[in-house]
Image: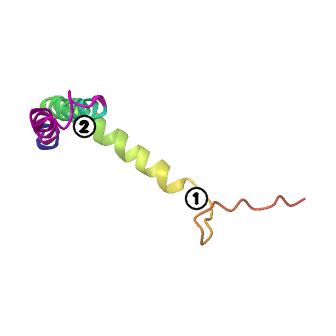
Amino acid sequence: MIEAERIEITQDYWVGEGRIKQPEPDFVARRDDFAGIVRMIDAIESDERLKERVIERMAARAKIAVVAPIAPVNAEGDVEIPEATD
């Protein structure tokens, strides 16, 4: 919520200073996203069964992520695709 408030305060200040005519839509959307994340976390925290299910799901996804192969990357940061062998 602190980040959402910071965005809102900054945008309001810039409008007041005349730097921008109105709050920038991308920043407003980001502020709303942060506020939505906080509301979602509050909802999860307030329901013990939902919290347990989220933790279980995150643990299951973490196992999947560990098993997934990672493509090799060269020094330039490009993914190296191995040549097919017959």
| Magenta segment | 6-25
Label 1 – label 2 distance at C-alpha: 30 Å
Q: Which residue is denoted by mark 2 in the rendering?
A: 52
* In the foreground, 40 or 30: 30
Q: Indicate the secondary structure of the residue bearing disc 1.
A: loop
Q: Position of residue 70 (x, y in %)?
A: 58, 59
**What is the quadrant of residue 60 in the picture?**
top left
Q: Amino acid at mark 1?
A: Ile
Element carrying mark 2: helix
Q: Is residue 43 left or right of residue 56?
A: left
- Of residues 13 and 85, the one drawn nearer to the viewer in this rendering: 13
Q: How many marks?
A: 2
- What mark, if any, has residue 5 been given in the picture? none
List x then y, in percent, for residue 25: 29, 28
Callout 2 crowding tier (Cα within 10 Å): few <14, some 14–19, many ≥20? few
- Mark on residue 70? 1
* Residue situated in front as seen by the camera: 68 or 79: 79
Color style of the picture: rainbow
Give the label, 1 or 2, closer to the camera: 1
Q: Which amino acid type is marked by label 2?
A: Glu
* Most common SS among magenta residues: helix
**Which part of the image, by quadrant, shows the N terminus?**
top left
Please state which of residues 4 and 83 is positioned toward the viewer in this rendering: 4
Residue depicted at 12% across the width and 42% down the height = 6
Quadrant of residue 34 within the rendered picture? top left
Q: Is residue 60 left or right of residue 53?
A: right
Residue 14 painted magenta: yes
